[in-house]
Amino acid sequence: MKMQKTKWLTKSKGVELKKYIPVPILLACVTSIVTMVRLEPNETFLERWLPFYIMAILVVLPIALLVLKGLNSFIKNKLNTISSWIQNLFFGVIMAFTLGGLMTGASLFTQNKFVSFLIFAQQWGDGILNITPFVLSLGLLIGLIVKPLIDRRKACIAFQKEHIHLKQ
């Protein structure tokens, strides 16, 4: 009697999941850097970093993935007439500001230093203004270098799959 593989255990799903392995590591690095910058003398690193990292994994990451998917769909459907480098730049800047804003909010929220929503919103806005040069640089990096490399890699994989399928 031969056992059937379930759909989520197929080789292609395993390969698909492998591409997300660097994400928690990258989030750990980013949250560590932000925590070190904002660490006060009377606090320990772990007590500040761990809640921030957990919030980044459980809140920021799912929202960012939804924005990523929606933004890719929007660009594909609505901005398909403009050049690919402008599309990639648009993608990079929007994603960088989304991630910057979410990470700033998560960092402030886990600090529990705000008395009211108004103060939290003001601190969040100030935080976003402070990181704007970094976020714009990150957006340019994502849009002009990283996204084109990922798109090229996806195109190569699709070509290889099609080529193998045609040989059979």
Image (spheres, rainbow, N blue to C red):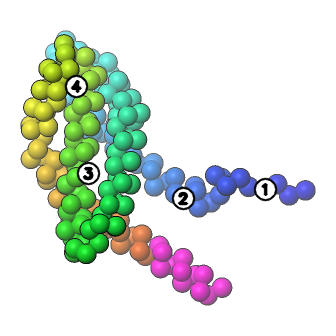
Q: CA distance from mark 1 to mark 4?
A: 48 Å
Q: Is residue 23 left or right of residue 88?
A: right
Element at badge 2? helix
Which of the two discs, 2 and 4, labels the residue nearer the N terminus? 2
Residue 85 locus on image (x, y percent): 21, 70
**Residue at the spot 34% in from the left edge and 37% down from the top edge:** 60
Q: Identify the amino acid type marked 2.
A: Val
- Residue under pointer 3: 95
Number of marks present in the image shown = 4
In the depicted structure, whether residue 134 falls above or below residue 121: below
Label 3 to label 4: alpha-carbon separation = 20 Å
What residue would you read off at disc 4? 108
Res 66 visible: yes
Question: Which is nearer the eye, 20 or 108?
Answer: 108
* Residue ID for mark 2: 15
**Nearer the viewer's eye, disc 1 or disc 3?**
3
The amino acid on which the numbered mark 4 sits, given as a three-letter code, is Leu
Q: Does the magenta segment cover residue 164?
A: yes
